[in-house]
Amino acid sequence: MEKSKVSLIRCSRYDTQDVEKAVGLAVDILGGPEAFARKGDRVLIKPNLLTDALPEEGVDTHPEVVRAVIRLFKPLASRIYCGDGPNVWGEKKDVERVYEVSGMKKVCREEGIEMVAFTVPKMRSGYPLTEWLEKTDRLINVPKFKTHSYTILTAGVKNLFGLVVGMNKMKIHKDFPSPAGLSRALLDIYESRKPDLTILDGIMAMEGEGPGSCGTVRPMELVAAAQDALALDFVLAVIMGLVPEDIPTIREAGRRGLFPETFSDIDIKGEDIRFFVAKDYRLPRTSFLNRMPDWAAVIARKMLRMKVCVIQDLCRACQKCRQSCPAEACRMEGGRMIIDESKCIFCLCCQEICPHKAIEVKKNFFLRMMTR
């Protein structure tokens, strides 16, 4: 069986020419854009646009990376569209703000392509995914390299969750209230529509309590590309200093037989991976839970008293956490936002979406000693 190929290219800044060169080289190593699209195809570019964050905050895919992808496929495509399903509620005014603040709308306007909203669902494998998958011939996945408090890593596979239309994301979180459960849903979505190509923005990555404003931006100087998004995620886990099976989506992919058995089954092209490996990559505080079976993680959270709290000094009562909570555990009380521990399913959507770093996971003394 032919090895999955992943190309790694060094790029140290978001200069238009530097990024375009790095993205072009990463894809050329894999066979060039002609290996992933035909003349006249309609192409959908799917970045990670989590929320209305400025490009320098490192929360969303940088617009210069998307610009480079647009220019790469322009000679082939009859039409190029760009879109995402930001956050987990997706009201039109919120989506428009994300497109504007992230800088994505400006780049798309300058490059003459259309930004589209994921508002109409079409069922695929039981999931309400955007109709734009039906309207286009090719899907180019352009994730951001970030940690994720719920799934440890958000990159190739996790970025596809944005294909789910609007409020349906909240239902999926509620139906799959564990990292392992959500990973099953993510792999269902991945198998229902595998990207034709994944191009990663890892020039400035995120570590710590990602994927939102609670995370910390970290320079990784990386642009990567792969036809197989799972292979890319496997390589990123190694770069983070992890055993890849620690990532719940990779563990689920292995259970389904979708993935090579060892790192040697992946063909790394371009730069030597040793240039990018970071032994001190800071993981989310909750990452140890993802290495446990579901039942053990539930017991650990109860016995060790992990809970999600609002830092009142930082909270601005914007109520984004309330809008994004699938369990309706966030509410205003006496002018303060609180989280009802009895309702909380520990999905960490509130932390993911809070723009003020006002949501934290609290541990008791014993747990702090165990995980320090």
Image: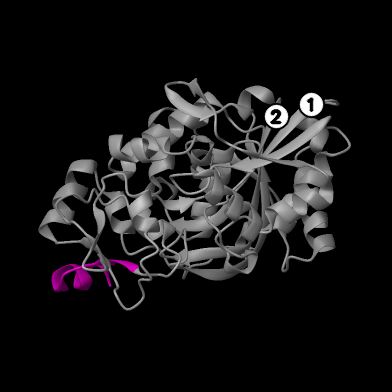
**Residue that carries the numbered disc 1 in the rendered image:** 41
Residue 293 circle label: none
**Would residue 1 be seen by someone viewing this image from the given angle?**
no
Residue drawn at x 35%, y 71% is 315
Q: Position of residue 162 (x, y in %)?
A: 52, 41
Task: Please indicate whether residue 137 sits to the left or right of residue 304 in the image.
Answer: right
Magenta span contains residue 370: yes
Residue 138 circle label: 2
- The residue sitting at the bottom extreme is 313
Question: Dot 2: within a 10 Å radius of its alpha carbon, few (fewer than 14), some, or many (20 or more) residues?
Answer: many
Q: Which quarter of the rendered picture does the C terminus lie within? A: bottom left
Task: Please indicate whether residue 335 sits to the left or right of residue 67 in the image.
Answer: left
Task: Please indicate whether residue 78 sits to the left or right of residue 288 in the image.
Answer: right
Amino acid type at image mark 2: Arg
Amino acid type at image mark 1: Asp
Magenta span contains residue 21: no
Q: Is 209 placed above or below 341 here?
A: below
Q: Which quarter of the rendered picture does the N terminus lie within? A: top right
Question: Dot 1: within a 10 Å radius of its alpha carbon, few (fewer than 14), some, or many (20 or more) residues?
Answer: some
Residue drawn at x 14%, y 52% is 342
